[in-house]
Amino acid sequence: MLFVATYSREARTTLRNVCRSHEDAVVRRFGRAALLSETAFSGFLALRMRYKHGDDVQIERTEPFNEFADVPERVRTAARTYEERAKPSTPYGKFAAGTEHPDPDELRGQEL
């Protein structure tokens, strides 16, 4: 998919008009940004906005998040067991302390 973010009022107006006129190309709209389907037509629409508004339009290609390929088993297990915890008010740091689950600071420093 293509992620299009806008940084000016004029660019937002153009994005809104593009999304309304070409609903079939829009996967999801977020106000100042939109996800467009990965088609040549969506590329055309995104580039058209970029040529019109310059750096006020940012275009990024996204790729699907695959939790099994992108996230280590240890982190997936920690997330699952944390969501199944007995007390919902327990913060993750306290939950993970003294267990084999990764420390929150360790997770913050680890790239996917």
Image: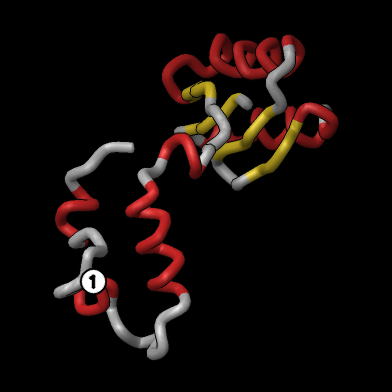
Q: Is residue 15 above or below residue 49?
A: below
Q: Is residue 104 above or below residue 53?
A: below
State the image coordinates of residue 88 (x, y, percent, origin top left): 41, 86
Q: Residue at x 72, y 37 (%)?
A: 27
Q: Which residue type does callout 1 highlight?
A: Ala
Q: Nearer the viewer, residue 107 or 74?
A: 74
The image quadrant of residue 101 is bottom left
The image quadrant of residue 26 is top right
- Give the side of residue 27 with respect to residue 92, left or right: right
How many badges with numbers are in the image?
Answer: 1
Q: In the rendered image, which quarter contains the N terminus?
A: top right
Q: Residue at x 58, y 35 (%)?
A: 12
Mark 1, residues whose alpha carbon is within 10 Å: few (<14), some, or many (≥20)?
A: some
State the image coordinates of residue 89 (x, y, percent, origin top left): 35, 87
| Location of mark 1 (residue) | 96
State the image coordinates of residue 40 (x, y, percent, origin top left): 73, 10
Q: Nearer the viewer, residue 19 or 79?
A: 79
State the image coordinates of residue 73 (x, y, percent, origin top left): 39, 49
Q: How is the image coloured?
A: secondary structure
Q: Is residue 90 above or below residue 27?
A: below
Query: Circle 1 — which element?
Result: helix
Q: Residue at x 27, y 37 (%)?
A: 111
- Give the side of residue 24 with respect to residue 48, left or right: right
